Image (spheres, rainbow, N blue to C red):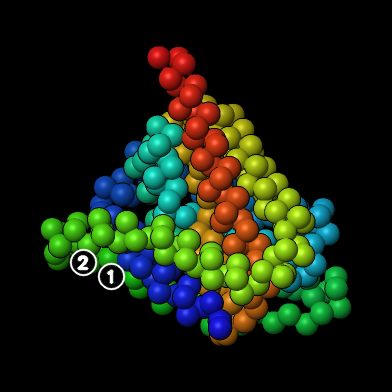
């Protein structure tokens, strides 16, 4: 069974949910806090892919996992980052803005970066990895931009119904992702068991370095505490479901193995960020 048929509806629902949450205020931070938005975008669009590339190269990952790790770093921020920002007492409005902007901008940056990575991996390993950029762009538009736009329009036309729908979908989103993870683990349990050590180490290193570098970057810029926490979370939490959809799609890479770094990353991402939030709240409580 190709997990794409499970990933696609989950990803579409998540983007539709994000669209419902969007309104004109969601992008107000672009004008209100241009420096904070710019920092977040630099962290997500440039810093994170560079870190992933460096980690994959240093860890000497096999070509299929090399591409899988960079792929998840090229994806937009995950919708759960908004919840984590709230729990960490960050800037939730900024978090929503960064998630929305990255979901749109990565429609174009992801194909460009992955085309470079595919060429690099092919040339250094004597392989012929073809990236159908046109199909990737079309799939991203259908699975990301269209449901995002549909959710936004739904909110505008039927605000009360949209609010009720968002509450229901919000409760279903996490169980759906866990179901996806369970199915994926069962289908690729042997490959995961054989490669968990190296992929787990690579994924953890990617997340920790991303958090450390983005935190340092925002601190050097003079950003406030709430903004720093938000940027750390936004850069540390990526839309792993999209990476799985691209890797396993029969129209793009058609590779379940390429999706393994994303599924392990998703697990580690939630654990590491929960620990981060726990220590922040503990520190806040001690200082009160």
In the rendered image, residue 285, in percent from the top left (x then y), is placed at 43, 20
Side of 253 relative to 81 (left or right): right
Give SS at disc 1: helix
* 252 versus 46 height, above or below: below
- Residue 150: numbered disc: 1
Residue in the foreground of this view, choosing between 45 and 163: 163
Quarter of the image for residue 18 reads bottom left
Q: Is residue 65 visible?
A: yes
Q: Residue at x 48, y 24 (%)?
A: 282
Label 2 residue SS? helix
Q: Nearer the viewer, residue 212 or 217?
A: 212
Q: Quadrant of residue 168?
A: bottom left
Residue 127, above or below 157: below
**Alpha carbons under labels 1 and 2: distance apart:** 6 Å
**Vertical side of 223 occupied by 266: above or below:** below
Sort mark 1 into few (<14), some (14-19) or many (20+) by Cα contacts within 10 Å.
some
What label does residue 154 carry, if any? 2
Quadrant in the rendering for residue 124 = bottom right
Q: Which of the pair 274/206 is nearer the observer?
A: 274
Q: Position of residue 269 (x, y in %)?
A: 57, 49
Residue 98 against residue 158 in the figure, above or below: above
Q: How many marks?
A: 2
- Residue 152 location (% of width, % of height): 26, 63
Is the Cβ of the residue at disc 1 closer than 8 Å to that at disc 2? yes
């Amino acid at each position: 069974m190709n997990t794409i048929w499970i990933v696609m509806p989950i990803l579409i629902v998540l983007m539709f949910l994000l669209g419902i949450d969007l309104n004109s205020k969601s992008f107000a931070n672009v004008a209100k806090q241009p420096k904070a938005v710019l920092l977040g975008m630099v962290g997500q669009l440039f810093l994170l892919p560079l870190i992933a590339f460096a980690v994959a190269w240093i860890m000497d990952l096999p070509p299929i996992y090399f591409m899988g790790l960079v792929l998840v770093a090229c994806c937009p921020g995950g919708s759960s980052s908004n919840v984590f920002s709230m729990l960490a007492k960050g800037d939730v409005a900024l978090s929503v803005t960064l998630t929305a902007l990255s979901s749109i901008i990565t429609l174009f940056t992801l194909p460009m970066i992955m085309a470079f990575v595919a060429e690099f991996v092919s040339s250094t390993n004597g392989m012929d990895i073809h990236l159908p950029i046109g199909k990737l762009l079309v799939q991203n538009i259908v699975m990301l931009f269209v449901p995002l736009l549909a959710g936004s329009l739904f909110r505008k036309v039927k605000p009360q119904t949209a609010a009720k729908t968002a509450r229901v979908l919000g409760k279903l989103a996490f169980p759906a992702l866990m179901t996806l993870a369970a199915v994926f683990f069962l289908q690729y349990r042997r490959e995961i068991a054989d490669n968990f050590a190296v992929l787990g180490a690579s994924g953890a290193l990617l997340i920790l370095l991303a958090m450390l570098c983005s935190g340092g970057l925002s601190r050097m810029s003079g950003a406030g505490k709430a903004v720093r926490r938000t940027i750390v979370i936004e850069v540390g939490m990526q839309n792993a479901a999209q990476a799985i959809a691209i890797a396993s799609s029969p129209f793009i890479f058609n590779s379940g193995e390429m999706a393994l770094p994303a599924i392990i990353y998703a697990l580690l991402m939630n654990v590491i960020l929960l620990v981060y939030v726990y220590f922040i709240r503990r520190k806040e409580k001690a200082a009160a």
